[in-house]
Each structure stands twice: as C-alpha cells, then as structure tokens.
Image (cartoon, coloured by chain):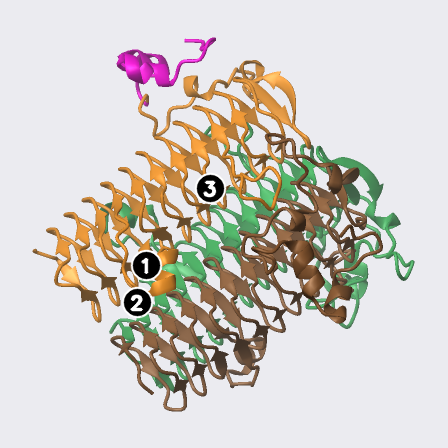
Chain colours: A brown, B green, C orange
Amino acid sequence: MNNFGIGNNTFVAESARIGNNVHIGHNCIIEDRVFIGDDTFIDSNTIIRQGVSIGRGGFIGSNCIIGEYLMDFCKDRQYHSHPLSIGVNVLIRSGSIIYAGSTIGDHFQTGHQTTIREKANIGNNVSIGTLSDIQCSCKIGNYVRLHSNVFIAPLSVIDDFVWLFPHVILTNDPTPPSSNFVGVHIHSFAIVASGAIVMPGLDLGQDCLIGAGAIVTKSVEPYTVVVGNPAKSISDVRKIKNKVTGKLVYPWREYFCNYMPWEGIGFEAWFNSLDLNEKQKFTISDINI
Amino acid sequence: MNNFGIGNNTFVAESARIGNNVHIGHNCIIEDRVFIGDDTFIDSNTIIRQGVSIGRGGFIGSNCIIGEYLMDFCKDRQYHSHPLSIGVNVLIRSGSIIYAGSTIGDHFQTGHQTTIREKANIGNNVSIGTLSDIQCSCKIGNYVRLHSNVFIAPLSVIDDFVWLFPHVILTNDPTPPSSNFVGVHIHSFAIVASGAIVMPGLDLGQDCLIGAGAIVTKSVEPYTVVVGNPAKSISDVRKIKNKVTGKLVYPWREYFCNYMPWEGIGFEAWFNSLDLNEKQKFTISDINI
Amino acid sequence: MNNFGIGNNTFVAESARIGNNVHIGHNCIIEDRVFIGDDTFIDSNTIIRQGVSIGRGGFIGSNCIIGEYLMDFCKDRQYHSHPLSIGVNVLIRSGSIIYAGSTIGDHFQTGHQTTIREKANIGNNVSIGTLSDIQCSCKIGNYVRLHSNVFIAPLSVIDDFVWLFPHVILTNDPTPPSSNFVGVHIHSFAIVASGAIVMPGLDLGQDCLIGAGAIVTKSVEPYTVVVGNPAKSISDVRKIKNKVTGKLVYPWREYFCNYMPWEGIGFEAWFNSLDLNEKQKFTISDINI
C-alpha cells in the first residue's frame, strides 16, 4: 500500500486492500474487505461498505455510498454478503448511491445523486444521468446512455447502444398494484426521447425512436417512430431528415459516433470487424448495412 | 443510556435522550433535546436536529437530515420550536431530508433522497419512494404508497390505501402563478399510474384508476378508469382483467394483500372486523362488499 | 477574521478569506482561496472548493458541494481555475451541488439536492426548486422561478420573470443522439405548467402559458395558451378568468406581485420607473400597458 494521500478523519478498515497511488479524501469510511485498485480517487465524505471491489483508475465523488445496504441489513443489522464489483476507470459523481449485490462494467459513468439498486447487471461504457433511479434486477448492456432522472423499473432489460433521455419511465406492473411484474425490453440502438413512458412488458424494437412525451402502450417495431398519448406510429426513422441540413440522420449509428466503438472508422467497418456471435446481437431481418 | 456503539467523531448533545441498544455511526450530529427510542440504528454522517423524537426500532440511513430547518431559522439563525415526531419501526433510507414541524406515524418507510417539508401529517405504514418531494401542509393517511419521484404540492390530501406510481404530480395552483392554492384530494384505494398529473383542487374518487401519463383536468368518479391528455373515462375498474390470467383484478383491495392489514384474511373479513367509525371511512354508495 | 463559530473537525484552508460573523458547522471543508462574505452561515458537512466566492449574508445548508469539479479535474485530478461567483443573501438548501465556473446573482435561492452545472449565468432573485437539474451553459435572467425537479438542457435561455413548474423539461437535441444542440428560449413572463416538455430550439413568447403536460412542438406566440400532446393553441391568456372569483388573472404580472419588484406599487408603476433600456427588455409589439 502506497497511497499518495488519506484525508483527515478517514477510517480505513484493516482488512481493506488499497492499491498504489490511491487518494482518499476527508471523513471517508472504507469498510472491511473493500478492494480499491491503483490510481483511484475517492473524494471526501464517501462511504464504501463491506466487500465492495472497485477497479483501477476510478473517480468516486463526494458524499457517495458504494455498497449500500439491502433490506436484509436494515431488518437484522447483520452483514450479509452481496458482492458489488465495479470495473476500471469509472466516474461516479457526487451523491450517488450504489447498492451491494450488483455487477457494473468498465468505464461506467454517473451523474449526481443517482441510485442503483441490487441485482443490477450493467455492461461496459454505460452512462447514467443525474438523479436516475435504477431499480433492482435490471439488465443493462454496453454503451447504453441514460440521461437525467430516468426511472427504470425492476426487471427491465436494455440492450446495447440504447439511449434514454431525461425523465423517461420504464414501468413493470400491468395491473397496479400487483406482484405480477413484467419488464420492458429495449432492443439495441433504440432511442426514447424525454419524458416518454413505456408500459409493462413491451418490446421496443431495434433502431426505433420514441418521441418526447409519448405514452407507449404497444410494442414498437424496428425503425418505427411513435409519438403521442397513446403513442402511434408516424414514420420510419430512415425517412427523418435534419431540418437544417436536409440530410438523413437515422439509424443514428450510421451518422453519430462520439464515444462509440466505431468512432473514427464508421459503424459499418466496426460491425464488419465483429465476430459472428457479436454480429448476431445486432442483426435484425432488415438491418440496412 | 446503554448504547452498543457510537462511531468516531459523532457529537451527541448532553440534553439528547438516547434509548437502550442504540447504534449511532461515524460523523453524526445529534442535537439538543433529541429523543431516540430503544433499538434504533442511525448510520454515519446523519444529522438529527433539535427536538426531534424518533420511536424505538427505527433505521435511519447515512447522510440524512432529520428535523431540517424551516425558513424562520434560515432568516434569523435562531432555533424556533417545530417538533417533529416520528413513530416506531421506521426505515428512512440514506440521503433523506425531513423537516421539523411534522408528524409521521409508525412503520414509515422512505427510499433515498426524499424530501418531506414541514406541517406534514403522515399516518402509519406509509412508504415514500426515492426522490419523492412532499411539500408542506400535506395530509397523508395510512398504508399509502408513493413510488419514486412523486411530487405532492402543498395542501394535498391523500386518504388511506392510495397508490401513486413514479413521477406522479399533484398540483395546487389553478392560475399559476398565484397564491390561491387548492389541493388535490385522493380518496381511499385510488391508484394513479406513472407520470400522471392531477390538476388543482380535483377529487379522485375511491377505487378509481388514473392511467400512466394521464393529464387529469376533471374530478374522477369512484371506480372510474381515465387515460389520455386530457384524461377521459374509458372503463370501470371492475371490468378490467389481467391479460394473462383473464381474471378480474379490481378493485385491487379484493385481489392484492401484500403488506396490507387484510393479508391472510382477505379484504372483506378485515373490513367486517372494523368498528363502525372505521368502516365509514371506506364506504361509498356502491361499495361492492 | 472574527468568526462566531467553527464546528468540530472542520478544515479551513489558510488561504481562505472568511468574513466577520461567519458560522461554519461541523465536518466542513473550505478549500484554498475561498472567499466568504460577512454574516454567512455554512451548515455542517458542506464542502466549498477552491476559488469559490460567496457574498455576504448567505445561508448554505448541510451536505452541499459548492464549486464542484468539472470533467477536467476528474480526468487529471489537477486543479483548473473555473471561478464560481455567488452573490449576496443567497439561500442554498441542503444537498445542493453547484459546479465551479458559473456566475450566480444576489438573493438566489435553491431547494434541496439541486444540481447546477458549469457555465451557468444566473441573474438576481432566482429560485430553483428541489431536485432541479440545470445543465451547463444556460442563461437564466432575473426573478425566474423554477419549481421542483425541472430539467434545463444545455444552451437554454430563460428571460426575466419566467415561471417553470414541477417536472418541466427543456430539451436541446432535435435528432437525438446528435451533437447539434439548439436551446429553447423562453421569453419574459412566460409560464410553463407542471410536466410540460419543450422541443429543442423553440421560442416561447412573452406572457404565454403552457398547460400542464403539454408537449410543445412549435414555437408559441406571446399571450398564447397551449395544451395537449402535441400542444395546440386554445386561447389567449387575457381571456382566462379565475373560476372562483370570475376575474381576469393574466397577464399575471398585472395581478400577482409577491416577491416581485413591483410589490406594493403594481406592475405599471414599476415599469414606468424603468429606464429606456430596461423597458425595451419587456416590450413586445402589443404589450398591453
């Protein structure tokens, strides 16, 4: 252990394993059996609970709680083992609360005051905006971007390269209140614009576009644009043009590459470089590449 | 006083009365004249301000502020007495802020980063989800469940056994901006699904069902289902069937009993066990029991 | 320096300049080159980062982060200078996070757990509600009131005396995802009711009224009332009457004056007292004064 700094009044449990060149701010609490990789920065007032593992190179803002208690602890106040594994080079902004019992990939990023409950399975290069609330037992793929204040109900499944804009809600109870939950499934490259609400159990097809404020009551076909309350199909995304340039803009993967794995080479070249298994994840009947 | 533990750097005022078997974490501040009942667990970094009373058996998560200052303190920085009484066996999750000057019942539960302003009157067995924002002078009955990120405007009245799902908004100003506020009144057993907005001063009748994303501009009759923007009546809840099982599911109190007082015996038997006064709270002209 | 109190375990950097009669609570961190004016109250657990300047008379609640790191710090963990200047007599409630690199005027007020990103330019007498999320590079005038949980996308421009009610969303990407952002512009005296969503690049005209839950897809003319999904014009604000009193209530500036600069004298007298430049800010072709 060779830290470049531990702040005042910070408690680090003896059984914690802290890498090289780790900074820990003031008033932090690092509990038993925590693992923190090299070159990690942990800002002041943050709590990292028992058994959390954080890969190298991460940045954890102030006032975070990483490895938050599940209900079992609240009931009997005894430690129950729910490992939380967080990948390398993450950026978890201040005020975020991440429960124990989840798996989170590399290059993960959050805004402020996010909540991620237990049994989440989150891939690599995922970004979750300020105030977003990811309920338990969700599956989120790679390169998924959730903007601010998104609500993801338990059992939701979000495939790779999906975009959810501010205040989107995914629901899971067809006849509330009940205990017959059925999650939404959003397929790759789909876009859900601000404030849209998706009813329980629906499929949003690959490359579809859900308009802002849409109340989605039926599954949506690939490439389809829906808007309204209730949402109705109005177009095919491949017909939408940028109003200023007059150019086609969808499917977005062919026109937008910031922070995407095809940045610099284009979607098609990237797709062709994938192995067969990976390709099949992104292949629908009429995929136009 | 016989604590099983007080953390490092925690301040407990001399005039605070702390019960037996109380745990207080690190960096907490327990101010003057606080009362904490036996078997309470208070996690690290939490502030409990002057004059707060918390019954036995509660769990208060990290980073909470219990007894937050009202405007009078912010103005003159002098303590003004606004008692806050919180019942037994509560579970207040991390990051929550509860103002001084309210009354909260037993078995109360919150998610994370909730805000409850002053002059709230909250019954027993109420649950308030992550990020929910309960403004001042609201009245909430018993067994009410508010999901994540619900906004309750000042002067709202919510009767027993009401369900509000994520991002529901109750408003109170018919001609904004004004100071002629008039609260919404939601009657027992009503359900408001995700993202619905209720206009000021409306009544939502017993056992009604407001669909997701509905913009409610007129009062809703008992048992009525409304959807859309603006919301229109489309059905009677008693005609709705679960799409998988084909069975009737409403009024929900006859079909759902998790954590309800009729769990194990059924609604009808529970209702019949009530005394006359209690029964009248839940009686509408055509109540079908 | 003549403080009336610094709490336990609080760190104040030597290069910080602290005014007279300043209170700083427990567990605070006041970093290098911070300036805090006279008569300021800073509650416990609050962090004020390098180079922040706060005028006299302010109240900063607990658990705030003032001068939060921009992305450059998260990347290289080196201090980069992004001055944050906050005016006099502000009230920043607990849990709020304000980034470095913004300018905020006098008499500023926030609710709890607000987030204000970098490059914000905020005038005087602005109030921002609990959980509101002001993204980077926004311009907000004077006497603007944002209620709870408002989302303001980057590049939004909000003129003086605008009201945004709970859960309003201003968007900025016409073809998401893209990097061709174009902000909304809301003109003086406009009112956007709860849960409305405004599409990118639109203008909301002076004194217009956007109904609750409206999905605004076209710019809105001055004095116009729009409602629905998509929003459609239904009236002129000057025809709207209070249902109880039967009296006209809009444009609101003629009927409502709480906390406004025309309180006590009326809008017209106040307007007539302005100099020519100021008057032109509030003049539209048919302004009815």
Q: Which residue is mark 3?
A: C154
Q: Residues within 10 Å of mark 3 (few under 14, many from 20)?
A: many
Q: Residues within 10 Å of mark 1 (few under 14, many from 20)?
A: many
Query: Going 71% across and 34% down the picture, which residue do you hit?
Result: B229
Rounded to the nearest angstrom, the CA distance separating label 2 from label 1 is 20 Å
Residue furthest toward the right? Answer: B246
Rounded to the nearest angstrom, the CA distance separating label 3 from label 1 is 27 Å
Q: Position of residue C131 (x, y in %)?
A: 46, 50
Q: Earlier in the sequence, mark 3 or mark 1?
A: 1
Q: Position of residue A167 (x, y in %)?
A: 59, 48
Q: Nearer the viewer, mark 2 or mark 1?
A: 1
Task: Tell me the element at label 1.
Answer: loop
Rounded to the nearest angstrom, the CA distance separating label 2 from label 3 is 46 Å
**Is B246 in front, or is B12?**
B246
- Is C276 a magenta residue? yes
Q: Are marks 2 and 1 in contact (CB under 8 Å)?
A: no
- Tag of residue B33: 2
Residue furthest toward the bottom? Answer: A15
Q: Give the residue type that dot 3 points to.
A: Pro
Q: Give the residue type that dot 1 points to.
A: Ser
Q: Residues within 10 Å of mark 2 (few under 14, many from 20)?
A: some
Q: Nearer the viewer, mark 2 or mark 3?
A: 3
